Amino acid sequence: MKRVFPRLFSLSVSKVSTVAEVGAWNNNVWVWKFGWRRNLFEWEKNLVCLLSHEVQGVSLNLEKEDSWEWREREEVGYSVKAGYLRLRGGRVGEREGEFMKFLKCKVVPSVQITTWRVLENKLATKANLEKRGITVVSSVCSLCGVEEESCTHLFFECRFA
């Protein structure tokens, strides 16, 4: 719900609940029971209708025990690599070819590592430090003093870099 219906998630009283805590069995039929912090506006009620339509297709079985299932690559099963790539928005093997080409480039290792960190947005820029919970005095670029200091800004947009 957090990703697809962020407004409803912000109003929900059950942000960290399990499925069992947001519904109940009634005559062997699962009934969803969403709770809200306040009365909803009409346009928010429309979102609840969309949410209800989305979860209506979810089938729960009272007689089957809960289990985890990995559907990304069923023939192989779950792997940490597959989970990591899925979280990053890719699929297993999708970026491996690009990365191997990159590793075979004949450049100084420090340049290769810096380039890789820029492409993966892993440099310790002020924007990235803030994302990781590190307090910075100002996120504005130290060179130009105009834009937020990010990899994109430092390497492609800043007129002083």
Image (cartoon, rainbow, N blue to C red):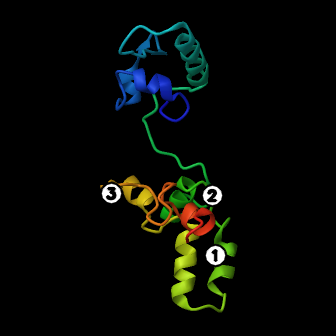
- Provide the secondary structure element on which disc 2 rests: loop
Labels 3 and 2: the sequence-earlier one: 2
Alpha carbon of mark 1 to alpha carbon of mark 2: how far? 13 Å
Labels 1 and 2: the sequence-earlier one: 2
Q: Position of residue 19 (x, y in %)?
A: 41, 28
133 lies left or right of 67: left
Label at residue 99: 1
Q: Position of residue 158 (x, y in %)?
A: 58, 64
The image quadrant of residue 95 is: bottom right
Residue type of the residue flagged with mark 3: Val
Residue type of the residue flagged with mark 1: Phe
- State the residue position of label 3: 136
Mark 3 and mark 2 residues within 8 Å of each other at the beta carbon = no
**Up/down of 120 relative to 72, above or below:** below
Label at residue 152: none
* Residue 88 seen from this side: yes
Q: Position of residue 66 (x, y in %)?
A: 43, 36
Residue type of the residue flagged with mark 2: Gly
- Provide the secondary structure element on which disc 1 rests: helix
The image quadrant of residue 125 is: bottom left
- State the residue position of label 2: 90
**Up/down of 145 relative to 40, above or below:** below
Mark 1 and mark 2 residues within 8 Å of each other at the beta carbon = no
* Residue 78 seen from this side: no
Alpha carbon of mark 3 to alpha carbon of mark 2: how far? 31 Å
Mark 3 and mark 1 residues within 8 Å of each other at the beta carbon = no
The residue located at (69%, 81%) in the rendering is: 101
- Provide the secondary structure element on which disc 3 rests: loop
Q: Nearer the viewer, residue 78 or 155?
A: 155
**Up/down of 26 relative to 3, above or below:** above
- Badge 2: how crowded within 10 Å, few (<14), some, or many (20+)? few
